[in-house]
Image (spheres, grey):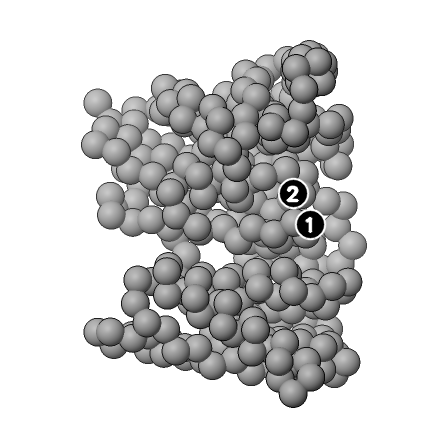
Amino acid sequence: MHKAGFVNIIGNPNVGKSTLMNAFIGEKLSIITSKAQTTRHRILGIVNGDDFQVVLSDTPGIIKPAYELQESMMDFVKSAFEDADVLLYMVEIGERELKDEAFFKKIQSSSIPVLLLLNKIDKSDQGQLEEQVQLWAEKVSNAEIYPISALEGFQVKEVFDRIIELLPESPPFYPKDQLTDKPERFFVNETIREKILLHYKKEVPYAVEIDTEEFFEDEDIIRMRSVIMVERDTQKGIIIGHKGSALKRVGIEARKDLEKFFGKQVHLELYVKVNKNWRTNQKQLKRFGYNQK
């Protein structure tokens, strides 16, 4: 007997969805920062065993959209309800509600299995944990509740074992040696964007999109040329920094991570271009992989 299915992770921003998916997979597929809206796309990660294939899906944190890019991000979340065999609804200690009532009602009325993962319990005491478990048991009575710490690995294996139990009998959906549905350039873009989220403040990281224009792989080195898109000239200056120092730091840190990811030497060239108001431009959003309706 072989089991396979789609397991989709949803929740508010910064509750640990990407950390959990990376813990399940054992690879860093989703970028992680302390900033909200770090994840913009729906990213698949595939875990294979002899008799199972778990297709995990990391989704953007649920927000009320303010502009076209965020509308597209929420479309990725909506799609996660449509093809799930198991739904992982992730909350963190201290949370009391999902930021979108319509999504919350979908979870409460879900006909598929829901595992409610109460994350970051390493930051709580026993009394708070018990109160939170009771609160969520009342709010989402159709869910199985698991207190976890995705960062520390607490109860991650137990949740994964339960997922496999809940999966339907099915042949695998993807080749058994496949790790994700995204191309290599996607992970180059995301790695660079992670460094920008980590090192720049205010609106600048959210006005950035990355486009890897060249990706040439030789036996012992990968040569990449990536463009950092911003919306305004002032943002371009901030990204580059004094005498190029800020951009150089991003390049060095991204290259180190990419060498770990690809397992070989990387040569990375970075450029910055202004692409005015790309976040509200339907054509540009489609080009960057959003608005896939």
Quadrant (top left, top right, bottom left, bottom right) of the N terminus? top left
Place of residue 37 in the rendered image (x, y in percent of width and height, measured from the top left)? 66, 51
Q: Secondary structure at mark 2?
A: loop
Residue at 36% x, 19% y is: 165
- In this picture, is 69 found above or below 60? below
Real-space Cα separation, disc 1 to disc 2, in angstroms: 6 Å
Q: What residue type is disc 1 on?
A: Ala
- Left or right placement of residue 195 versus residue 94 in this view: left
Residue placed under numbered mark 2 in the picture: 14
Q: Quadrant of the C terminus?
A: bottom right
Name the N-terminal-most of marks 1 and 2. 2
- Relative placement, left or right, of 144 versus 54 is right
SS at mark 1 in the image:
loop
The label on residue 85 is: none
Closest to the observer: 159 or 88? 159
Kindly check if marks 1 and 2 are in contact, taking CB atoms under 8 A apart as contact.
yes
User: Residue at (73%, 27%) from the top-left corner?
Assistant: 94
Instruction: Give, as a three-letter code, the residue at label 2.
Output: Asn
In the image, which disc is placed on residue 36? Answer: 1
Query: In this view of the protein, which residue sits in the foreground, 53 or 19?
Result: 19
Residue 63 occupies quadrant:
top right
Where 250 falls versus 148 (above or below)?
Answer: below
